[in-house]
Amino acid sequence: MSLFQDLNQRGITGIIITHEAEVSEQTRRIIRIQDGLIVDQGEYHR
């Protein structure tokens, strides 16, 4: 995760797909997808 955080601080956007809450809690934004549709977006951490 530190590599992704470092790249993001440099202005590079990365996409992480996970089922792990511990991983998603370290991100700046969460977009939830269910059955191929966006069901929730815009949660910002930090």
Image (cartoon, rainbow, N blue to C red):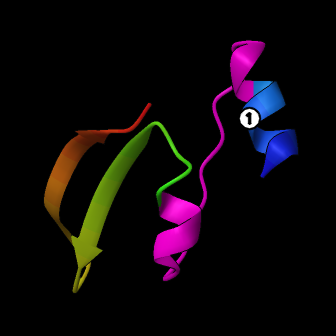
As drawn, which residue projects farthest toward the right? 3
Q: Tell me what residue is drawn at x 59 percent, y 65 percent.
A: 23
Three-letter code, disc 1: Gln
**Which quarter of the picture shows residue 43?**
top left
Q: Report whether residue 17 is seen.
A: no
Residue 31 visible from this viewpoint? yes
Residue at 82% of width from left, 28% of height from top?
Answer: 6
As for residue 18 lying within the magenta part, the answer is: yes
- Crowding around mark 1 (Cα neighbors within 10 Å: few <14, some 14 to 19, many 20+) is some
Q: Nearer the viewer, residue 6 or 22?
A: 22
Above-or-below relation of 10 to 12: above
In the image, the segment drawn in magenta is: 8-24
Helix, strand or loop: magenta stretch = loop
Q: Is residue 23 left or right of residue 45?
A: right
Horizontal arrangement in the rendering, residue 15 relative to residue 2 (left or right): left
Q: Is residue 8 left or right of residue 43?
A: right
Residue 13 in the image: state x and y as whole percent: 63, 30
Up/down of 9 relative to 42, above or below: above
**Residue 31 in the image, given as x and y percentages of width and height:** 31, 54
Where the C terminus falls, by quadrant?
A: top left
Above/below status of 10 relative to 26: above
Residue at 77%, 41% (x, y): give it: 4
Outermost residue on the left side: it is: 39
Q: Mark 1 = which residue?
A: 5
Q: How many marks?
A: 1
Q: Position of residue 41 (x, y in %)?
A: 20, 49
Helix, strand, or loop for circle 1?
helix
Give the residue drawn at x 46%, y 74%.
Answer: 21
